[in-house]
């Protein structure tokens, strides 16, 4: 692979046009005369690091989600069977038992 012919200032300008001014990546790449994947590469290179989520109590969040799961499951089941005792989808039909006469 070749080396980059563009300065960091040039790349930062392209990133600023995309992030701050809101121009589409393809438009910026065409205007600057670079391939369309170069701005994506610059975006990753000059990306601001994601903030650390050290303030979140993972155990408390896990307990909250476990408490919420039965309610959400019940809501899903109600919506799935909203047409009464019949299943909402043919795929969930109960097998028919034939009784010998």
Image: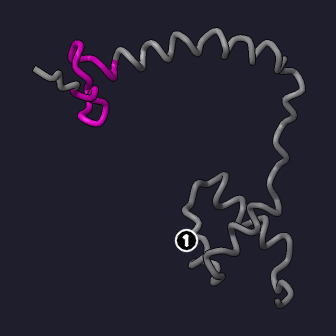
Residue 61 horizontal side relative to residue 21, left or right: right
Q: Quadrant of residue 61?
A: top right
Locate residue 19, reporting x and y percent. Answer: 66, 54
Locate residue 16, reporting x and y percent. Answer: 71, 59
Q: Residue at x 64, y 9 (%)?
A: 67
- Asked whether residue 91 is drawn in magenta, I would say yes
Picture layout, residue 19 above or below residue 86: below
Q: Main secondary structure of the magenta part?
A: loop
Name the residue that disc number 1 marks.
26
Image quadrant where one finds the N terminus: bottom right
Query: What residue occupies the far left of the structure in this picture?
Result: 101
Is residue 36 or residue 19 the one in the foreground?
36
Picture layout, residue 101 above or below residue 52: above
Picture layout, residue 6 above or below residue 27: below
Locate residue 45, reporting x and y percent. Answer: 82, 63
Query: What residue occupies the far front of the structure in this picture?
Result: 101
Is residue 84 or residue 17 the one in the foreground?
84
Q: What's the magenta region?
A: 79-96
Is residue 58 or residue 35 the one in the foreground?
58
């Amino acid at each position: 692979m070749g080396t980059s012919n563009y300065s960091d200032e040039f790349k930062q300008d392209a990133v600023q046009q995309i992030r701050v001014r809101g121009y589409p990546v393809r438009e910026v790449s065409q205007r600057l005369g670079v391939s369309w994947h170069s701005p994506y590469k610059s975006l990753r290179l000059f990306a601001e690091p994601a903030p650390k989520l050290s303030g979140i109590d993972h155990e408390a969040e896990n307990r909250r989600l476990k408490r919420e799961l039965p309610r959400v499951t019940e809501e899903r089941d109600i919506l799935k069977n909203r047409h009464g005792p019949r299943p909402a989808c043919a795929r969930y039909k109960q097998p028919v038992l034939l009784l010998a006469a």
